[in-house]
Amino acid sequence: MRTRPLKVALLGCGVVGSEVARIMTTHADDLAARIGAPVELAGVAVRRPDRVRAGIPQELITTDATALVKRGDIDVVVEVIGGVEPARGLITAAFEHGASVVSANKALLAEDGAALHAAAEANGRDLYYEAAVAGAIPLIRPLRESLAGDKVNRVLGIVNGTTNFILDKMDGSGAGYSEALDEATALGYAEADPTADVEGFDAAAKAAILAGIAFHTRVRLDDVYREGMTEVTAADFASAKRMGCTIKLLAICERAADGESVTARVHPAMIPLSHPLASVRGAYNAVFVEADAAGQLMFYGPGAGGAPTASAVLGDLVAVCRNLVNGATGPGDSAYTRLPVSPMGEVVTRYHISLDVADKPGVLAQVATVFAEQGVSIDTVRQQGRDSGGGDGATAEGREGGEASLVVVTHRAPDAALAGTVEALRKLDTVRGVASIMRVEGE
Amino acid sequence: MRTRPLKVALLGCGVVGSEVARIMTTHADDLAARIGAPVELAGVAVRRPDRVRAGIPQELITTDATALVKRGDIDVVVEVIGGVEPARGLITAAFEHGASVVSANKALLAEDGAALHAAAEANGRDLYYEAAVAGAIPLIRPLRESLAGDKVNRVLGIVNGTTNFILDKMDGSGAGYSEALDEATALGYAEADPTADVEGFDAAAKAAILAGIAFHTRVRLDDVYREGMTEVTAADFASAKRMGCTIKLLAICERAADGESVTARVHPAMIPLSHPLASVRGAYNAVFVEADAAGQLMFYGPGAGGAPTASAVLGDLVAVCRNLVNGATGPGDSAYTRLPVSPMGEVVTRYHISLDVADKPGVLAQVATVFAEQGVSIDTVRQQGRDSGGGDGATAEGREGGEASLVVVTHRAPDAALAGTVEALRKLDTVRGVASIMRVEGE
Ligand SMILES: NC(=O)c1ccc[n+]([C@@H]2O[C@H](COP(=O)([O-])OP(=O)(O)OC[C@H]3O[C@@H](n4cnc5c(N)ncnc54)[C@H](OP(=O)(O)O)[C@@H]3O)[C@@H](O)[C@H]2O)c1
Ligand SMILES: NC(=O)c1ccc[n+]([C@@H]2O[C@H](COP(=O)([O-])OP(=O)(O)OC[C@H]3O[C@@H](n4cnc5c(N)ncnc54)[C@H](OP(=O)(O)O)[C@@H]3O)[C@@H](O)[C@H]2O)c1
């Protein structure tokens, strides 16, 4: 074992950083044995220097992250500040000063992964970020390394714990969105401003990272179609149940059937109760990966939280330290396929559409004609009188006056065709409103 | 990209080897891009040279595996022959001649992993074997690398597809063991001689490998307690159902509560239907990992089959080739903790015991006294008259003469105490027989 310790600068000491520091201290001997050299916490950058930070010597604390990164004796920078700046500048400076970097920063990686990888490579250093996607769950490494000899066709997962907690709550208790959100906030599963989670920004960043790695190409945050889950209603869950489904916020990355393009998207979707993702409870995450030779794999575990996320950070820290000891670098960026990212309109999937319609004869025929004209083939239709309280007895065709609802489930069709259909439906006099449109996945 | 190709010798071209060769050929460009150098199939060793092997040029085929390995120009040897010899000698020779090795050979790794790792290290080469445990499922790499900064406390998994298929069949259809085995054989899920699978030898080899990696210690095949699943009956499944459980053949590796020793075992066990492993169907595999910081992780996928296993082999091939291109080696053996492996008697778990008892008053008191004397605390007891057809109405205490059954579920107790209890129960006049003893896990 080499005796000169590897020096680690920790940028950020919040939920994740404090756990990283704790494990580095309590597991120091194990880490040294696994790396082949001791690791030493050489400095900790924070915003508020006077906060008490258990187990961290006060002399290590600094508010000058830039100076810490540029000190010259730092071997590895662990960035757990989050956000695009100053994290980006600090990471770039770290590479320029000869350090390798471990980060948990999905926002930054999704925004600017290519440039950061290039900076790492230019300086012969590593950039690892297992913790950026699905917390403790090993996902980046399996995709990047274990499946390096295979062809991944699809990644389908629950990658945001906050929204899964909320949807699971709605499913289990029949609660509405805001009630479930309140509970998530009270229990610490949702932040005071939940926008990044509930609007799907967090999941979209992860989808961009996963798609890039899975398909060996470049997918930016802007390339990811994104729909949040704030409009999912108790009525949607009731419809899902009637179909033997539940609703999850999914990140879906797919290679097109011809292999010549990819898509990445985040939106709520119905999935069959028999699908393994349907039984992912609470704030847990799970990701399905489909590859040519391997078949279907699933990875499941805690997608967030200080300790789980720190576990992933520490795994990366051991890997980059080993690489430094060996004078090598790990597998870096691999975007050689340069596959174009197709727009959402080209995604092919199934749809569940609820329409509020006039309760009079001929409505179904009109609606069916619109679907046919747009080339969207109907799988099933269910009609239901407004006042029948969800029973299947009363049908729109059978009564005059009032309102009724019509639920259409389609066969697979391009998203653009579905959008065209919905636009045309809205123009029908007999269609009072499109109550919900939900994609159906995982079949 | 370097242009001199890396030369790969393939030892064995059966179920797995033929798929390795196929993927190497069809995905040659992708592999080259991911490695940074082209890879070339330089020779294929088999037993029967005259068999037609689609896609493999005849001039690559040889029956002299030793000569192939010693050729001097081979960069990587892929060993997919199986069994201890000649695989062991060939792998050792490969290292001595400067090659790195990828193997799928659980039997050999469990038997002699330490010596093989030492040979790899002595020659500065890699030994990778992701495919040896749970086929396509990334498990060795996540344990060895992703969790390298964490402390793994438990690995609990279904690691044999054949037995899971049989047990799943028995559970679903009420079939007996031999009927379900026949179906597994007919469908190609069981080999003509199913001993290695049904007696738990295959799972025990995997448990030895997993325990060694998870706990950074040395666990040999002989250290693994092993019980097959040939004695599991339809009656056991009925009992399991009554408890809200199903039965799985589990490989369980645990760190003792004091952290100073480990255990590894393979046996059938009842697990609650709510446990994610309970819903692993057919020939699929799934492994639960519990770690201090990460919490509970699960890995799921196809545990065998030519293509899935080849996916894992190819992932390793890419990794060792990258290492060769970089002049580095990957994380090797890490057995620094040297934790002793405790015998089965020290394992602490719960038990479900079915006794055939005399149907007369006082039996329960006698039986309960034996448990108390052995220090095994009873959780629940269920008595049932022999002729009452499984109903819970008639009790042993209530009737004279005939036979009855008594089902005892215990609290957690050391296996040795349970064994002592069973021995003492057998000596009771009123106990006609011990119909089954099954451990209860995953609660
Ligand atoms: N929390 C999770 O469960 C989780 C899961 C996966 C990934 N992540 C990622 O991990 C990263 C960190 O998340 P977190 O939850 O630990 O955040 P956090 O609790 O808000 O902690 C952020 C830390 O960064 C420090 N900081 C902020 N601005 C700084 C600056 N300009 N210079 C130096 N230090 C600065 C803060 O200092 P003070 O302590 O003085 O405020 C704090 O210690 C983010 O990228 C996040 O996306 C988090
Ligand atoms: N099959 C699976 O699903 C699976 C899953 C995980 C791991 N594995 C492991 O993968 C390995 C291979 O399994 P497999 O199912 O592919 O076995 P297999 O179908 O029986 O193939 C064995 C191959 O080795 C060749 N061979 C046997 N003895 C040889 C010798 N002395 N010299 C040269 N070649 C020899 C055979 O030649 P011939 O073709 O001429 O007979 C055959 O090509 C085993 O370690 C197994 O445990 C298999």
Image (tube, coloured by chain):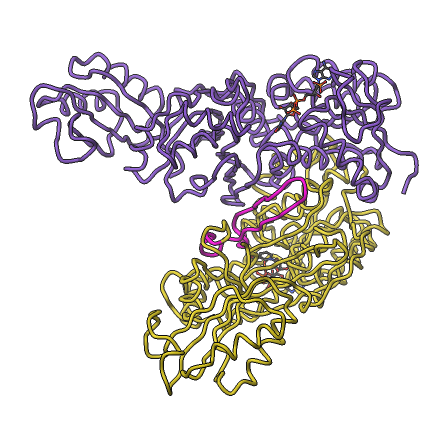
Chain colours: A yellow, B purple
| Left or right of B59 in this view: A199 | left
In the image, is residue B400 above or below residue A96?
A: above
- The correct choice, above or below, for A340 with respect to A141 in the image is below
Q: For the C terminus of chain A, which image quadrant?
A: bottom right
Question: Which quadrant of the figure shows ligand 2?
Answer: top right
Q: Would you say residue B137 is visible in this rendering? A: yes
Q: Is residue B163 magenta?
A: no
Task: Report how many numbered discs are placed on residues in the image.
Answer: 0
Compare residues A386 and A41 and report the one nearer the observer.
A386
- Residue located farthest toward the right when viewing the structure as drawn: B3
The answer to whether residue A207 is above or below residue B184 is below
Going 56% across and 76% down the picture, which residue do you hit? A369
Residue B311 position in % (x across, y down): 68, 37
Q: In this view, does B234 lie to the left or right of B286?
A: left
Q: Position of residue A9 (x, y in %)?
A: 70, 51
Q: Check the picture and name the quadrant holding the N terminus of chain A.
A: top right
User: Image quadrant of residue B416?
Assistant: top left
Q: Which residue appears at 49% of the width and 60% of the height?
A: A164
Give the percent coordinates (x, y) of residue A201: 61, 67
Q: Looking at the picture, does residue A105 appear above or below residue B42?
A: below
Q: Indicate yes or no whether the magenta region holds residue A286.
A: yes
Residue A381: x %, y % from top left = 46, 68
Residue range in magenta is A278-306
Q: Which of A111 and B307 is in front in this view?
A: B307
Q: Is residue A12 left or right of residue A215?
A: left
Residue A85 in view: no
